[in-house]
Image (cartoon, rainbow, N blue to C red):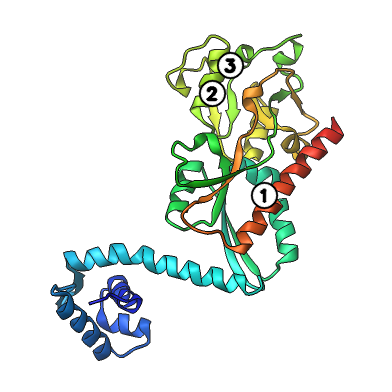
Amino acid sequence: MKISLRHLQLIKAIGDTKNFARAAQKLNISQPALSRAVSTLEEQLGCKLFDRSRKGVTPTVFGKFLLKRGGPILQDVSIVERDLNQLQGLESGEMVIGSGPLPAEVSLGKAVARFSRNYPRVNVQIIVDRTPNLLTMLHNRKLDLFVADTRMLKDKSELNITMLPQQQGYFCCRRSHPLTEKTDPTVKDVFSYPLATMWFPEALLNVLARSVGLQLDSIKDLPCAVLQCDYLKVLSDIVAESDAVGLITRPILNCSIHKQELVLLPISTPELNSHYGLISLTRYSQSPVVQIFQQYMIEADEQCNREIEKNM
């Protein structure tokens, strides 16, 4: 007996609705036809898939197994169908992009804008979240790809990574900050004040700390508080109106409403270079729209770097 995609669709509909009548309505077939199909499948498999009672329909251990294994299969088939439709001309379709907060602020909008101008009928959904959550969504096939700091990825064996052009990160503070009076401020001086930052790898923070002789077991061991937020507007408000020191890139500073109030500290920190990449799964081929979008994303980051060099 071969289990077909149609069987998996029937089982999923019953599992979702927990009712044969509602499942039949969802599948646009009659309830007797659905009942006969499931009974025939149970007979041929030699096991019961659902327990029927007045309270409803409950999957047996065999039913749960098929629901668990069949769900991803149906999802993959749906994605294949979508990709095939996109291959027929890129006239329509959809793409779900994940992004860490920083690349979402720097270049993602520009890349999506250019893509949308050229492919106005392709739906694009953007999900901004932290890297671990984005990675989970990618493995669950809820994302086509995401852009994030690759240093946060512990296991890259199943990932296809296309690195984006690097951007230098800087410490910044308000113009009247005590650190602006120092001739040669250091990272150790920065750690004497609260640090306002997006979420970033604790390993990177440890590297910075060790460079100035500090041994940390966690971010909580810093001399001053860490103020974390994934919204740059909030962080820039904090830095502009307190003694907190922020982490920033030139493109973000140039676009900030606090541009005139903030200054970059003259501290050489090559460790703060970005390591952002476009991340997808190796076991699935990329759809045409994803391949095109990746190129737009690379070009958007390259444009940011050219603008930085021009304004320096």
**In the picture shown, does residue 230 fall above or below 27?**
above
Q: Identify which amino acid the numbered label 3 is placed on.
A: Phe
Residue positioned 70% across, 34% down in the render:
167
Instruction: Tell me the SS state at disc 2.
Output: helix
Mark closest to the chain's N terminus, 3 or 2? 3
**In the picture shown, does residue 153 fall above or below 295?**
above
Quarter of the picture containing the N terminus is: bottom left
Mark closest to the chain's N terminus, 2 or 1? 1
Residue 70 location (% of width, % of height)? 32, 67
Quarter of the picture containing the C terminus is: top right
Residue positioned 72% across, 37% down in the render:
252
User: In the drawing, what numbered circle is on residue 205?
Assistant: 2
Instruction: Tell me the SS state at disc 1.
Output: helix
Asked whether residue 130 appears in the rendered view, the answer is yes
Asked whether residue 99 appears in the rendered view, the answer is no
User: In the drawing, what numbered circle is on residue 191?
Assistant: 3
**In the picture shown, does residue 178 fall above or below 295?**
above
Residue 289 location (% of width, % of height)? 63, 62
Residue 117 location (% of width, % of height)? 75, 63
**How many numbered discs, if any?**
3
3D distance between C-alphas at marks 3 and 2: 11 Å
Q: In the figure, is residue 203 to the left or right of 164?
A: left
Residue positioned 66% across, 41% down in the render:
164
User: 10 Å neighbourhood of mark 3: few (<14), some, or many (≥20)?
Assistant: many
Judge by depth and name the residue closer to the eye, 235 or 221. Answer: 221
Judge by depth and name the residue closer to the eye, 130 or 33. Answer: 33
User: 10 Å neighbourhood of mark 1: few (<14), some, or many (≥20)?
Assistant: many
Residue 265 location (% of width, % of height)? 73, 20
User: 10 Å neighbourhood of mark 2: few (<14), some, or many (≥20)?
Assistant: some
